[in-house]
Amino acid sequence: MLSDKHKNKAISLYVCGVEIIFCVTGDSGTNLMSATEDSNDYMISVNIDQSSQ
């Protein structure tokens, strides 16, 4: 399991006004997706199709 540091960083970016995060990482994208869902914001990811998750 990945640490929550990526999720916490994404949440802090959204709180500061960032509207979209472009994620170019492997498995840490899962935590970023969780933060995006929690904050009802947007992210763009590469490498893995996570649209069904």
Image (spheres, grey):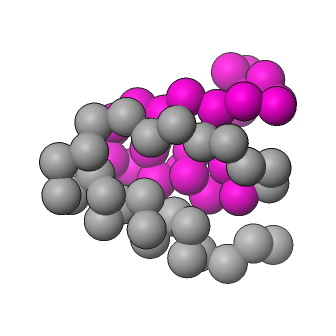
**Residue at x 64% of width, y 32% of height:** 45
Q: Which residues are magenta?
A: 28-53
* Residue 35 inside the magenta-drawn segment: yes
Q: Is residue 8 magenta?
A: no
The residue lying toward the viewer, choosing from 10 and 50, is: 10
- The answer to whether one can see residue 30 in this image is no
Judge by depth and name the residue closer to the eye, 34 or 20: 20
* Image quarter of the C terminus: top right
Q: Residue at x 44, y 40 (%)?
A: 21
The reply to whether residue 32 is in sight is yes
Residue 30: where, in percent of width, then height? Answer: 69, 50
Query: Horizontally, is 9 left or right of 34 in the view?
Result: left
> Image height check: is 2 above or below 13?
below
Which part of the image, by quadrant, shows the N terminus?
bottom right
The x, y position of residue 28, in whole percent, is 71, 58
Count of all numbered marks drawn on residues in the image: 0
Residue 26, position as x, y percentages in the image: 80, 49
Quarter occupied by residue 48 = top right
Q: Residue at x 55, y 76 (%)?
A: 5
Q: Is residue 8 left or right of residue 16?
A: right
Q: Quadrant of residue 50?
A: top right
Determine whether 8 is above or below 13 in the image.
Answer: below
- Establish if 52 lies above or below 32: above
Which residue: 58% across, 75% down? 4
